[in-house]
Amino acid sequence: MKDDRLYLIHIRDSMARIKRYTKEGKEAFLGSTLLQDAVMRNLQTLTESSQRLSADFRNQHGAIDWRGMAGLRNVLVHQYMGIDLVRVWTIVERDLPRLKRMLHPVLTGLKPPRSTPQKRKGRSRSQGRKKKK
C-alpha cells in the first residue's frame, strides 16, 4: 500500500477535479473545449495512475475494471482525434461515481504527502564566500 499511496492520491484528486469541472452539466461540457481538455487530461492522469498501482492492490479490488481503464487511457493518449465526447460524459456521469464508491474506504484515509525538507548540497552561503577587496 505504501507504494500505491501516490497513485491513489492522483486518482482521488483527478476525480475531484473532474467533478468540479463538470458541475454545470453535460451541455456545458459538450460546448466547451476548455472543459473537455481539462476533463480528458484528468481522466488520462487517473487512468495512468490506475495502471501503476501494484498488482496486489488491483487484485484486492478485482471488481474494478482495471483493464477498461487501461483501454480508456490508450484511447485518450493515442486516439485522441477520435474521442467520442458523449462517451466521455457517460464515463464522468456513470463510471467515476462508481469508481469513487468502490475506492472510498481506501481514498478516505489518504492525506497529502508530507513534504520533507531538502538537504542543501554544497557549502552554506557563509562558508563559501570570500570577501571582495
Image (tube, helix red, strand yellow):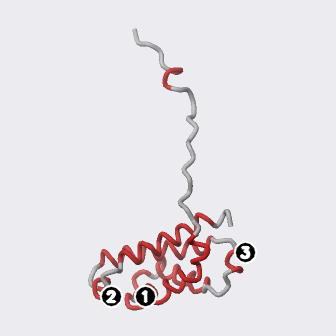
Residue drawn at point x = 35 percent, y = 76 percent: 21
The answer to whether the residues at label 2 and label 1 have Cβ atoms under 8 Å apart is yes
The answer to whether the residues at label 3 and label 2 have Cβ atoms under 8 Å apart is no
Residue drawn at point x = 57 percent, y = 86 percent: 68
Q: How many marks?
A: 3
Residue holding disc 2? 26
First in sequence: mark 1 or mark 3? 3
Give the numbered dot on residue 115. Answer: none
Residue holding disc 3? 56
Tell me: 47 left or right of 24.
right
Residue drawn at point x = 66 percent, y = 81 percent: 61
First in sequence: mark 2 or mark 1? 2
Task: State how far apart marks 1 and 3 are (Cα).
Answer: 28 Å
Residue 96: image x %, image y %?
A: 49, 83
Tell me: 32 left or right of 95.
left
Residue 80: image x %, image y %?
A: 42, 80
